Image (cartoon, helix red, strand yellow):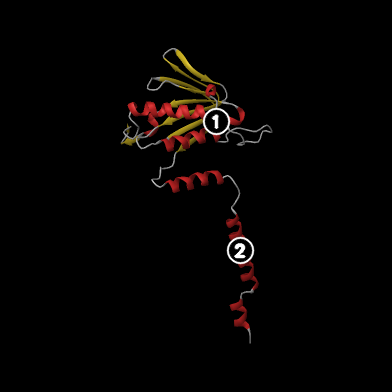
């Protein structure tokens, strides 16, 4: 699954002459669902949308707060063209999930977002309609996000989730130990304290 996430000061969707959704400050998300996507992909994208730190904190420090931290709004729009590949100059969309399958899948993503956040703050466009999307990008900030391939091994999926949780933290204890060990080895080598070297210098 692919998502284009834009930080916005406002965004709205119109179909014909009717405005069907609008938000103030928050995120506008274009979602492209592929034929291979599963609910694991949907859960990953949902988690990222709500937790990406794309906003300033109270002190003006950038990249510190998520949309949930500030109770900002989210506008989602289904966008099958994100799954485009090209044959020459002609776009091909066979990687996109067919509409009859994509519509309930997309609806489940919206439900996940509303369940994990505040339902009234999650808006959407009109699936399958010809829409006009009006975006006032803030920054501009635009993030491209692709869900990782789904592994058939549940243990690997759990490992991936643990990596995501710890990636923003500092180095692990084992990493620090390795670093300290490497530093000590370098110091010993430079000082000629290695046992084999000193024995060769003995008369």
Q: In the figure, residue 33 lies in which quadrant? A: top left
Residue 141 in picture, x, y percent from top left: 54, 32
Q: In this view, does 9 lie above or below 173?
A: above
Q: Is residue 189 above or below residue 116?
A: below
Q: Which residue is drawn at 65% across and 33% down?
A: 57
Disc 1 element: strand
Does any portion of residue 158 appear in the rendered image?
yes
Q: Which of 70 and 130 is in front in this view?
A: 70
Q: In the figure, residue 140 lies in which quadrant? A: top right
Indicate the quadrant containing the C terminus: top left, top right, bottom left or bottom right. bottom right
Residue underneath mark 1:
140
Q: Residue at x 50, y 44 (%)?
A: 161
Q: Is residue 202 above or below residue 160?
A: below
Q: Which residue is drawn at 58% across and 33% down?
A: 66
Residue 25 in picture, x, y percent from top left: 57, 24
Q: Residue at x 61, y 57 (%)?
A: 176
Disc 2 element: helix
Residue 69 in picture, x, y percent from top left: 61, 31
Q: Residues within 10 Å of mark 2 (few under 14, many from 20)?
A: few
Can you tell which mark lies on residue 32?
none
Indicate the quadrant containing the N terminus: top left, top right, bottom left or bottom right. top left
Residue underneath mark 2:
181
Q: Residues within 10 Å of mark 1 (few under 14, many from 20)?
A: few
In the picture as drawn, the residue positioned furthest to the top comes out as 17
Q: Which of 50 and 117 is in front in this view?
A: 117
CA distance separating discs 2 and 1: 44 Å
Does any portion of residue 78 appear in the rendered image?
no
Residue 166 in picture, x, y percent from top left: 56, 46
In the picture as drawn, the residue positioned furthest to the bottom comes out as 203
Q: Is residue 160 left or right of residue 103?
A: right
């Amino acid at each position: 699954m692919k998502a284009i996430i834009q930080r916005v000061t406002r965004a709205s969707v119109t179909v014909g002459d009717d405005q069907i959704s609008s938000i103030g400050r928050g995120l506008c998300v274009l979602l492209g669902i592929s034929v291979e996507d599963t609910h694991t992909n949907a859960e990953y994208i949902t988690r990222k949308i709500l937790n990406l730190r794309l906003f300033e904190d109270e002190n003006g420090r950038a990249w510190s707060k998520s949309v949930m931290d500030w109770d900002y709004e989210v506008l989602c729009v289904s966008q099958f063209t994100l799954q485009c590949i090209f044959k020459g100059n002609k776009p091909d969309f066979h990687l996109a999930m067919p509409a009859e399958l994509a519509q309930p899948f997309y609806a489940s993503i919206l439900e996940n977002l509303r369940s994990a956040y505040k339902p009234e703050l999650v808006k959407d466009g009109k699936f399958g309609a010809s829409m006009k999307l009006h975006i006032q990008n803030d920054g501009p900030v635009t993030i491209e996000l692709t869900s990782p391939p789904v592994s058939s091994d549940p243990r690997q999926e759990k490992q991936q989730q643990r990596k995501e949780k710890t990636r923003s933290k500092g180095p692990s204890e084992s990493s620090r130990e390795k670093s300290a060990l490497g530093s000590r080895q370098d110091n010993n080598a430079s000082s000629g304290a290695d046992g084999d070297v000193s024995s060769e210098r003995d008369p």
